[in-house]
């Protein structure tokens, strides 16, 4: 009986470890996607090509974990640019007292990719997308950004129909 319980416990630990690794890889993917989208936004680019992705990959992907995360980062990048006009419309509607051009590059980039995950991704997990965006804002933006990002994305989640 002890062995059955011990192996079940071991299986649970392995599952939790695997789930944690998956979550960390997704967070890394979002961070990589953010860096790319932010760079493109600063340059006022509304599209990209495969050469641009390849240059970014060669410059920024330093280890095996980043390479594993890159696949999902590319999905976020591709989806964000594919749906950019609709994403910006959703953001503009949710940010009633703000224009997109008035938002910081970082906050706008974070929210664009989160809106992709909320509204357009194959597997929609809006609460996860919002929480991850808030964490990115805490890491990469200024002190008030997390609350701003959270508020706008919550309105997008409730009101944006695509």
Image: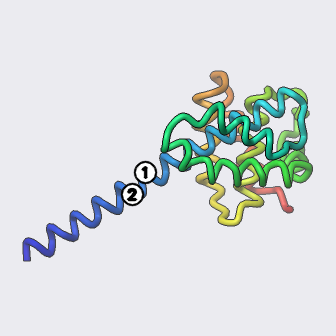
Query: Image point 83% across, 56% down: which residue?
Result: 160
Residue position for label 1: 21
Structure colour scheme:
rainbow
Near mark 2 (Cα within 10 A), the count class, few <14, some 14-19 or many ≥20, is few
CB atoms of marks 2 and 1 within 8 Å: yes
Residue 114 in percent (x, y) is at 71, 47
Q: Quadrant of residue 79?
A: bottom right
In the rendered image, the quadrant that contains the C terminus is bottom right
Residue 9 in percent (x, y) is at 21, 65
Circle 2: element type: helix
Near mark 1 (Cα within 10 A), the count class, few <14, some 14-19 or many ≥20, is few
Residue 24 in percent (x, y) is at 48, 46
Q: In this view, does 43 lie to the left or right of 132?
A: right
In the rendered image of this protein, does residue 52 appear above or below residue 23? above
Which labelled disc corresponds to residue 18? 2
Q: How far apart are marks 2 and 1 (CA)?
A: 5 Å
Query: Image point 85% across, 42% down: which residue?
Result: 48
Q: Quadrant of residue 144?
A: top right
Circle 1: element type: helix
Query: Image point 50% across, 38% down: which residue?
Result: 63
Q: Which of 132 and 60 is in front in this view?
A: 60
Query: Image point 85% across, 61% down: which residue?
Result: 161
In the rendered image of this protein, does residue 125 appear above or below residue 3? above
């Amino acid at each position: 009986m002890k062995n059955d319980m011990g192996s079940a416990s071991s299986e649970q630990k392995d599952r939790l470890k695997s789930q944690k690794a998956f979550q960390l890889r997704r967070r890394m993917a979002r961070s990589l996607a953010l860096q790319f989208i932010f760079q493109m936004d600063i340059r006022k680019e509304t599209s990209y090509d495969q050469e641009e992705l390849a240059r970014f990959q060669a410059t920024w992907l330093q280890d095996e974990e980043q390479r594993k995360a890159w696949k999902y980062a590319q999905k976020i990048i591709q989806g964000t640019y594919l749906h950019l006009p609709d994403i910006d419309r959703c953001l503009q509607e949710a940010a009633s007292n703000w224009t997109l051009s008035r938002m910081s590059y970082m906050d706008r980039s974070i929210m664009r990719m989160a809106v992709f995950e909320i509204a357009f991704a194959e597997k929609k997990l809006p609460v996860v997308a919002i929480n991850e965006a808030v964490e990115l804002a805490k890491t990469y933006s200024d002190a008030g950004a997390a609350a701003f990002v959270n508020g706008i994305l919550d309105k997008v989640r409730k009101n944006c129909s695509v």
